[in-house]
Amino acid sequence: MILHGRFTAQHEGPLVVFLIGVRVNNWLRWREWLPVVRAMNPMISYLYNHPESGFLGLGGQWLSMDFRGLLMVQYWRSSEDLERFARTDPELHPQAWRDFFRKAFKGGAVGIWHETYVVERQESVYGNMPRIGLARVSKVVPIRGRLETMRERLQKESV
């Protein structure tokens, strides 16, 4: 659904942005890269079904310009929650990680990457857009009054 007009996301509390990507380096070695790509959906389903994990939701998924890579933007309540999921809770992620290294990483047919950002302040603008990015996991409000400029949106008092 398109939200007509200009809006901003109002997120309350701590926020961690986690970018995770995969890149197919050799299309012909699909037995190595396909399991890596397939491992993501069960993990995301688990996280949506377990809000106590600290996972707030997906901001979106994108295909790279060279059609070899996928990027997923995730929002988390804290870096501690993200680390707990990555290391111990549930066994689903550690098993997928072990499988990746055992079956795929050493062969080089597929690569993965991630970046983690602990966000102190954030601001956003969405114009005639569906919910995307932080707007998918936060309250969305029209931009007017004290929210007209980036500087004003970044001020804690205007949120």
Image (cartoon, rainbow, N blue to C red):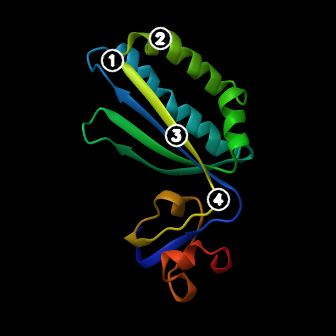
Q: Quadrant of residue 87?
A: top right
Q: Secondary structure at mark 1?
A: helix
Q: Between disc 4 and disc 3, whose residue precedes?
A: 3
Distance from disc 1 to disc 2, alpha carbons, whole Å, reads: 12 Å
Amino acid under disc 1: Trp
* Label at residue 103: 2
Q: Between disc 4 and disc 2, whose residue precedes?
A: 2
Q: Residues within 10 Å of mark 2 (few under 14, many from 20)?
A: some
* Label at residue 115: 3
Q: Is residue 60 visible?
A: yes
Q: Between disc 1 and disc 2, whose residue precedes?
A: 1
Q: Between disc 1 and disc 3, whose residue precedes?
A: 1
Residue corresponding to mark 4: 120
Amino acid under disc 4: Glu
Q: Nearer the viewer, mark 2 or mark 3?
A: 3
**Which residue is at a point 38% across and 21% down the rendered structure image?**
110
Amino acid under disc 3: Glu
Q: Are marks 4 and 3 in contact (CB under 8 Å)?
A: no
Q: Nearer the viewer, mark 4 or mark 2?
A: 4
Seen from the viewer's position, the closer of residues 152 and 126 is 152
Seen from the viewer's position, the closer of residues 42 and 110 is 110
Q: Secondary structure at mark 3?
A: strand
